[in-house]
Amino acid sequence: MPGSGPLSSLVVLDLTRVLAGPYCTMMLLDLGARVIKVETPEGGDDSRRFGPFLKGKSAYFMSLNRGKESIALDLKADKDRAIFEALLGKADILVENYRPGTMEKLGYGWETLSARHPRLIYAAASGFGHSGPYAKRPAYDMVVQAMGGIMSLTGHAGGPPTRVGTSVGDITAGLFTAVGVNAALYHREKTGQGMKIDVAMLDCQVAILENAIARYFATGEIPGPLGARHPTITPFEAFAAKDGHLVVAAGNDGLFQKLCDTLGRPDLAANPLFTSNDLRTRHHGALKEEIEQALAGSTVADWLARLEAAGVPCGPINNVGQILSDPQIKARNMVVHTEDKDVGRLNMAGNPIKLSGFADPLTRGAVPDLDADRARILKEFGIAIEA
């Protein structure tokens, strides 16, 4: 059920499944919207069948759909279409991530819906968008990571193609769709008119290439993978110490001087090879060797303490367990939980958007079983039709 937040008066019809769309609607829910998840009667969201499983329930599905409501509707069946159309009359936002053309085949394309519901905001997240030669192609995160260029920048030079370790193809699409929805809501406040939001996963991958695009257009050279090193800021990478690795990001001359002083190597800052960021980047290999020689004399924990005291940006290379138990993450309420009648307590990621006007509770709403909320939704919205 909806919580408190700036979107608390809004109703979202969520026709999405798997990750990109559900991530978007989860963001809207965390901002206060009520999200009614419309699922197919034959098994619902595909991710209900993705592991890992806890007492037969998908932890993957639960992490993306807590707090939503579920109603199962066959949009090809007359009685269920009547329910869906009644819900459309109450909704502010519809989010879907079908392949382009699917909603039109069902009779619920943008042109049809906007004519009937001029205030409706229609958000579509798909692999390649609703225009262009690839529009009808299916896509998953792996496909757009490969096509969008990000895999060509990931990993180490000479290594095999490497996927980013989290599903950035889906997640960025979900985030950009949520941004579009909020912009459309502001526009509707001014004009009274809804609009269509068309977000392509492939477009989103291009949008986040940032420095790689700048380098390509500025130099004509095609960037490749650099491991943990930043392509244009040095030193800005992972370094080996006595018992492991740490990250140091000395992004300007002042920070580089502090780093050199802390390492006991003030001479490095005066070395003609390293006196500017451009020179340091050109000679990054030689500089890394000098830094790691100094770091080899002590442990990661010792160096982190010294560098933090000196004001040099740095950090440990945490695994997932370490970051989830980090005191900063706990203080920021980035691990929340929900209670499930079968599974019990389930921890999950919190909302990174902290709003001064609204609480950020430790708990989230329950994860809906398929079609669990049908009777209550029909009663509450006064829909006197039962499938």
Image (cartoon, grey):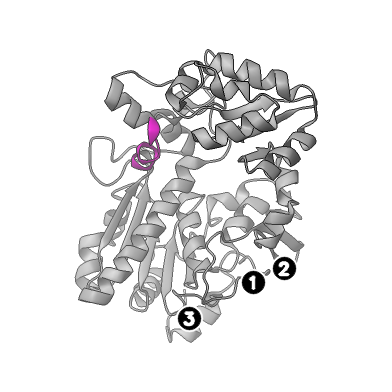
Taking the spot 78% from the left edge, 37% from the top edge, the residue there is 301
Q: Which residue is mark 1?
A: 361
The residue beneath circle 2 is: 339
Q: Is residue 346 left or right of residue 148?
A: right
Q: Residues within 10 Å of mark 1 (few under 14, many from 20)?
A: few
The answer to whether one can see residue 377 in this image is yes
* Side of 313 where 5 appears, left or right: left
- Residue 222, image x, y percentages: 36, 19
Lower sequence index among marks 1 and 2: 2
Residue 3, image x, y percentages: 55, 76
Q: Secondary structure at mark 2?
A: strand
Q: Is residue 72 visible?
A: no
Lower position in the chain sequence, tag 1 or tag 3: 1
Residue type highlighted by circle 3: Leu
**Image quadrant in which you'd find residue 204:** top left
Q: Nearer the viewer, mark 1 or mark 3?
A: 1
- The residue range painted magenta reads 203-211
Q: Which mark is nearer the camera, 1 or 2?
A: 1
Residue nearest the viewer, comparing 208 with 385: 208
Determine which of the numbered discs, if any, sits on residue 378 in the image. 3
Is disc 1 placed on a helix, strand or loop?
loop
Q: Secondary structure at mark 3?
A: helix
